[in-house]
Image (tube, rainbow, N blue to C red):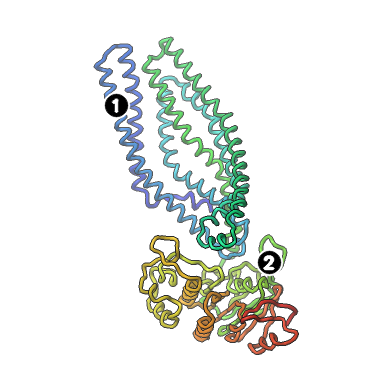
Amino acid sequence: MINKFLSLKLLKNARTELLILAIITIISTYVVTKYISNTQILFDSFILSGDYTKCIFSLAIICGVRIIQIIIRQFQTYVETRIRGKMANNIEQEMYQTIYPRTITNIETFNYQNDLQSITYGVNTIAQLFLSSITVLQNLILIIVYAYILFSQLWFLPLIVLIYNVPKIISDVKLSKIKFLYVEQNSDLSRQKAHYSHFFTKPDAQKEIIVFFLRDYLFTKWNKLAQKLFFVEIKQKKKELMLSSTLSIIAPIGYFITQFILLIYVFNKVITFGNYMSLTTTVSLLEASLFSISPIVGNTSQLTTFKKKMDDFYKRYLNNPIITKFECVEKIETIRLNNLIFKYPNSDSLVLKNINLKISLGDVVVILGGNGSGKSTLGKVLVGLHEVPEGTLVFNDYDVNSIDRHDLYKNVSIVTQDFNKFPFPIIENITSSNDYDTSKLNELVNKYPYLIPKDLFENTETLLGIDFLGSRQLSGGQWQRIAIARALYKQSSILLLDEATSAIDPETELKLINEIVQSRKDRITIIITHRVDLAKYANRILVMKHGKISELSNYSDLLDAMNSKENIIRSNENEIRSFSGAI
């Protein structure tokens, strides 16, 4: 996985800028050498010969070189900004395309969130390494040039400078490891703090915070986490400072030794004062170049750790099973569950227990059950969103684990309780594309005119929601209708509606479900609901309790069960409130 973030493809649209930067580096290196040589000439001319004309000439050259350096540096900054922008965008694209899970089983866990935060830190570090590679190359060239200048005059000088800068590199290597461990160990705490912070600014949370006077309570919770994280960060910073300070004090000592040697050479007239000034300048420039690449060397040393973490993340959450060839399915005709059991990660409790079920084309299945009975989980399993044991979920006689999930999801539409409210214009919200089928959209609008507000359909550029300037706020029911329209537009073999009409008025709800069922007689429709009235449109009625299902033959049997003294379903205003016993 890490190889994707170190690929030269990330430079695909920045080649021109890289060429310009290479030319700038060559010119910049030449200018630096002229600056150093003229510094020596200036001081030697002034002190030794008293040739003021030569001094002024050298000074003018140095001034001109400085002006050129400033111009080059500004232009270089502009070019580097373009390169960094393009590379950062390419890296971000690669990350979002890579983090594309097949199912939701493992990602709906706190482990995934913590691991993702560590991986994001790793990717950002690698991105910085990639982006800093330009700086590294430039400084490596300069280091070679500076080392050559020093070596040509006093051969041992570059060795001394390199030796007393080694501790700084060692320090940065250790610091990089400490920082990565810190992020890994404290990701859960930092996520908790961020989560509580979100409540103070999230518009949807304000009504309950106001009515239930939650602000002080939330602030107390947030402040406790903030204080805990603050002390952890201070402890971490102390550790970093102790390490860096201990090893960094060697550099000034090394610099002192270098200056002491140079001054002895000046006093003994081995080198001129001009040589001393140019060598001192070169030593400082060499140190600056070494210091600039030292943190990058530190981060590079952690590539092995990042690679292992990222590979583990990919295998755990994103990788496909080891199958040489996936089966392709163009249309789902049957869904079969064979002694299905299911439990969530980090849990020992079974959510679904030994379920056997077959659903065929034309079936309208209504699943009823109390809260926590497992009906929503069953619905997600039936459309392939969860990982299940081999042989327990079969589509068209193919085990789900042998099917290309991308092909499978082409056959699936869903409306869940936690559907997304995308800040797109109305048409993009429904079609999920800029390039949509106009005839399909018009057919949908004509068939279900009450799903899409007419004024929004006529203003196709208006963003929906409350997040951005010019957006149009919608009610919960309007958002739910748009989510249903999105599912119907896809015209999939399987349609899962999980409490999909809970915010729609009862009259419109019954009309909508009836029309959906009538238009999908040659497909599979699965409706998960608390509302008993919706069961009248089903030819299959399943009642769930404690992860098990019982099937009623028809709507009359359901009503009889509700009205019997031993009933297991008690209805209140057409909603199932609780379940007891067994059918």
Q: Is 529 in front, or is 248?
A: 529
Residue 236 horizontal side relative to residue 43, left or right: right
- Residue 322 found in image quarter: bottom right
Three-letter residue code for mark 2: Lys
Residue 485 horizontal side relative to residue 189, left or right: left
Residue 481 vertical placement versus 153 (above, below):
below
- Residue 465 found in image quarter: bottom left
Which residue position holds label 2?
343
Q: Secondary structure at mark 1?
A: helix
Can the viewer see residue 559 in this picture?
A: yes
The C terminus, quarter of image: bottom right
Q: Percent x, y for residue 475?
A: 48, 70
Residue 131 vertical placement versus 339 (above, below):
above
Q: Percent x, y for residue 45?
A: 30, 15
Residue 286 vertical placement versus 218 (above, below):
above
Give me the residue at 59% from left, 39% from top: 234
Give me the residue at 41% from left, 70% from top: 426
Q: Is 10 in front, or is 174?
A: 174
Q: Is 42 in front, or is 145?
A: 42
* Mark linked to residue 63: 1
* Mark linked to residue 471: none
Give me the residue at 60% from left, 54% from top: 218
Three-letter residue code for mark 1: Cys
Q: Percent x, y for residue 374?
A: 66, 72
Q: Is 537 in front, or is 60?
A: 537
Q: Residues within 10 Å of mark 1 (few under 14, many from 20)?
A: few
- Residue 139 found in image quarter: top left
Q: Residues within 10 Å of mark 2 (few under 14, many from 20)?
A: some
Q: Secondary structure at mark 2?
A: loop
Q: How far is disc 2 from disc 1 in space, using C-alphas? A: 74 Å
Q: Percent x, y for residue 530?
A: 62, 77
